[in-house]
């Protein structure tokens, strides 16, 4: 996995007011932490982080560049990002410091490729999960997995045990769960027919017509 370099600076925590001030100045509040790292408040360049990291798919490693020697060259996993509910811009991020020699557990997204046989026959491709958890060294984290679905007929599925893992990458699971399947086409329920009149009863239009005819004969 490629490691992206980003510029960071230590910051003083000051609550929501301080966070708003940072965002107005083009910064993103962040926090660096890890199993051997006490939480360190940071600030990132919003433009740099948004263009180089925020829009990428999957898990990503970043190498910190900073004037502070306690931060420089630390490697971290982008653990979580918070987004503005209206603009969609990143407003906070968590960075998890990693040891490049120790395995970690991360989620990797799935890409479903090919056109399933069952879809050609009218079925519907139904992804069940969009990512799976794996364990590996930080630099071995896959960006995504391709899941081939071309051979799936209606009722078929690809399970986690069908996945071919790269060397040094192990999928984590307790049961052989399905990743994707092809379900039968949706059948629309036919409209309910109007209830037939009871035996001996006359439908309203017919009764009205008979009444008219009787009046003309008298």
Image (cartoon, rainbow, N blue to C red):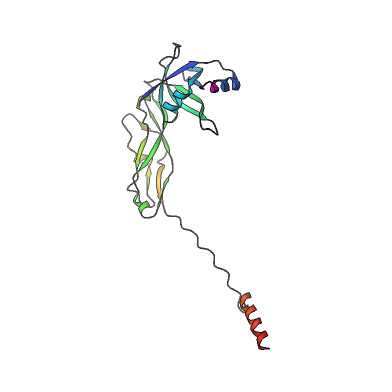
Q: Residue 84 at what x, y percent from top left? A: 54, 31
- Magenta stretch? 22-26
Relative height, residue 138 to residue 161 (above, below): above
Let me know if residue 17 is in the magenta part: no
Q: Nearer the viewer, residue 87 or 186?
A: 87
Quarter the N terminus occupies: top left
Camera sees residue 131: yes
Seen at 39% across and 29% down, the residue is 135
Q: Residue 128 at what x, y percent from top left? A: 44, 43
- Give the residue at the far left of this rendering: 167
Report the magenta stretch's main SS.
helix
Camera sees residue 32: no
Q: Nearer the viewer, residue 194 or 89?
A: 89
Relative height, residue 43 to residue 90 (above, below): above
Q: How many marks?
A: 0
Q: Looking at the rendering, which quadrant does residue 146 occupy? A: top left
User: Is residue 161 toward the left or the right of residue 24 in the image?
Assistant: left
Q: Looking at the rendering, which quadrant does residue 122 occupy? A: bottom left
Quarter the C terminus occupies: bottom right
User: Is residue 15 toward the left or the right of residue 167 in the image?
Assistant: right
Q: Residue 153 at what x, y percent from top left? A: 35, 51
Q: Residue 38 at what x, y percent from top left? A: 50, 17
């Amino acid at each position: 996995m490629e490691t992206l370099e980003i510029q960071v600076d230590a910051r003083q925590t000051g609550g929501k007011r301080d966070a708003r001030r940072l965002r107005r100045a083009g910064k993103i509040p962040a926090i660096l932490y890890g199993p051997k790292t006490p939480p360190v408040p940071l600030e990132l360049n919003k433009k740099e982080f948004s263009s180089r990291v925020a829009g990428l798919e999957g898990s990503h490693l970043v190498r910190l560049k900073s004037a502070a020697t306690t931060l420089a060259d630390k490697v971290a996993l982008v653990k979580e990002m918070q987004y503005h509910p209206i603009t969609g811009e990143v407003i906070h991020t968590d960075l998890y410091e990693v040891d490049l020699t120790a395995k970690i557990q991360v989620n990797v997204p799935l890409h479903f490729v090919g056109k399933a046989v069952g879809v050609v026959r009218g079925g519907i491709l139904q992804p069940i999960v969009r990512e799976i958890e794996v364990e590996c060294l930080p630099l071995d984290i896959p960006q995504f997995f391709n899941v081939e679905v071309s051979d799936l007929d209606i009722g078929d599925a690809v399970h986690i045990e069908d996945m071919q893992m790269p060397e040094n990458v192990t999928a984590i699971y307790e049961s052989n769960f399905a990743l994707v399947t092809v379900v039968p086409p949706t059948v629309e329920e036919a409209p309910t027919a109007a209830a037939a009149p009871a035996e001996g009863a006359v439908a309203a239009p017919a009764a009205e017509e008979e009444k008219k005819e009787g009046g003309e004969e008298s």
